Amino acid sequence: MPPAPTEGDALRQAAISFETTALPWLADVARFAISLTRNRHDADDLVQETYLQAFRHWHTYAPDRDVRRWLFTICRNAFIRSGRKHTIAIAELDDGDLDAMPAVISHAGAVEEGLANLFDEVDVGPAIRKAVGALPEPHRTVLILVDVERLSYQEASEVLSVPVGTVRSRLFRARRAIQTALIEHARDMGLGGKGK
Amino acid sequence: MTDHSSAAQAKPSFPRDCEAIVRALWDYLDSALDGPSMIIIDAHLAECTSCREHFRFERALIDNLHALRREHHDVGSLRDRLIAALREARKAPRP
């Protein structure tokens, strides 16, 4: 009969389980942490704190839960608890009803200027990175969770502890800001001009 | 078929059926509408050139944002640091 597992065995097993389940999401958590802290150094500290917290509470993790979302929630809470003094541009918290209409109107104007094929004609990657970096909180975090990490509105609302409607309105404002920045970028590159 | 491309002025107006569609475009792209609404928009986009152009543009925007996830994000040194911290945490007595 094999010997009964010791506490050390159980801890080793938990560590293996944690490393194989949670560590594969390190890049995702790091990306989310940067969206919160806006700099790599603070983000690395936040990621470490997130993973240490997650490991300490690994025994509470239910295997059927989405581990990535669980880590995002811990990361967000750790960020709030840290109380670090960041120079974060806080957007006006206007959570009024929004829809895609303003963006579509903006696109219609861009089409008139000859920018209909913006995404085909311009390498928008650098402009998108710049525009995302310039987004004020809390819009940037929502955009990272929904558009980059592909969480649903509901999942993002659970990570951020805000209502779904708030996620939606912040997301739409963020998208509109990115779209406006891309259209301006295309104009700066001399594209379009038909409507001028 | 509905075509309102000539309406693309500074403040374009949209035919009533198109207006409802473009307002819901992001919710549609995020699959955040109920089944019947998704079907109605599917059908409208299949017929309406102008709304389909808006849809393609907004989808390209979201696809390009999602592409940020594929960018190389070097977490090698962070991973090493993390594994070392986790091993230390394992050694520490539990509270």
Image (cartoon, coloured by chain):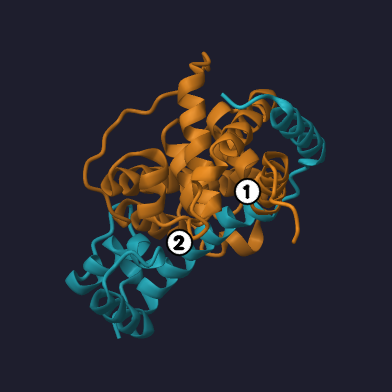
Chain colours: A orange, B cyan
Is A23 left or right of B81, judged from the image as shown?
left
Q: How crowded is mark 2: few (under 14 residues within 10 Å), some or many (20 or more)?
A: many
At 70% from the left and 43% from the top, the residue drawn is: A6
- Which residue of the protein is positioned furthest toward the left in this rendering? B16
Name the amino acid, label 2: Glu
Is B74 left or right of A24, judged from the image as shown?
right
Q: Give the residue at mark 1.
A: A190
Residue situated in front as seen by the camera: A179 or A153: A153
Is A137 left or right of A121, judged from the image as shown?
left
Camera sees residue A112: yes
Q: Looking at the rendering, in which quadrant would you find the C terminus of chain B?
A: top right
Callout 2: helix, strand or loop?
Answer: helix
Q: Residue A152 at what x, y percent from top left?
A: 41, 57
What label sits on residue B58 in the rendered view? 2
The chain that hosts pointer 2 is: B
Name the amino acid, label 1: Gly
Label 1 close to label 2 by CB (< 8 Å):
no
At 40% from the left and 55% from the top, the residue drawn is: A109
Callout 1: helix, strand or loop?
Answer: loop
At 20% from the left and 74% from the top, the residue drawn is: B17
Q: Looking at the rendering, in which quadrant would you find the N terminus of chain B?
A: bottom left
Camera sees residue A114: no
